[in-house]
Amino acid sequence: MAARYVLSALAAVFLLAAARRWTRNARRIDSATRIWLLVAFIFTAVAAWLQWHTS
């Protein structure tokens, strides 16, 4: 399985984890939610870079 697909799937998992954490604490975004979102963004960026530069 190509790394870009694995990283894309993991980015989606981290995004869902952030959404789940955010819905539990709906008042505001806490630091853990921001970290989940940051990790999801990093995995998305790396997966996109692999998609376009390794074709």
Image: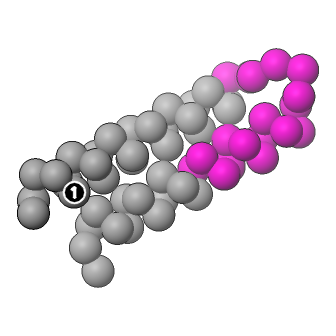
Between 48 and 24, the one lying in front of the other is 48
**Location of residue 53 in the rendering, given as x and y in whole percent from the top left corner:** 10, 52
Residue 25 belongs to the span the image colors magenta: yes
Residue drawn at x 88%, y 28% as measured from the top left: 26
How many labels, in total? 1
Asked which colour scheme the image uses, the reply is one colour
- Of all residues shown, which one is farthest toward the bottom? 1
Compared across the picture, whether 48 is left or right of 6 comes to left
The residue segment tinted magenta is: 14-31
Query: Which secondary structure class fits the magenta region best?
Result: helix
Give the residue pinned by disc 1: 51
The C terminus: image quadrant: bottom left
**Location of residue 34 in the rendering, given as x and y in whole percent from the top left corner:** 61, 27
Amino acid type of the residue tagged 1 in the rendering = Gln
Quadrant of the rendered structure where residue 3 is? bottom left
Compared across the picture, whether 33 is left or right of 40 comes to right
Please say if 9 is above or below 21. Answer: below
Residue drawn at x 22%, y 57% as measured from the top left: 51
Please say if 55 is above or below 33. Answer: below
**Location of residue 32 in the rendering, given as x and y in whole percent from the top left corner:** 67, 31
Between 12 and 35, the one lying in front of the other is 12
Compared across the picture, whether 15 is left or right of 54 comes to right
Around disc 1, counting alpha carbons within 10 Å, would you say few (fewer than 14), some (14 to 19), or many (20 or more)? some
Residue 6 belongs to the span the image colors magenta: no
Q: Which element is circle 1 on?
A: helix
Residue drawn at x 30%, y 52% as measured from the top left: 47
Please say if 53 is above or below 25. Answer: below
The N terminus: image quadrant: bottom left
**Location of residue 35 in the rendering, given as x and y in whole percent from the top left corner:** 57, 31
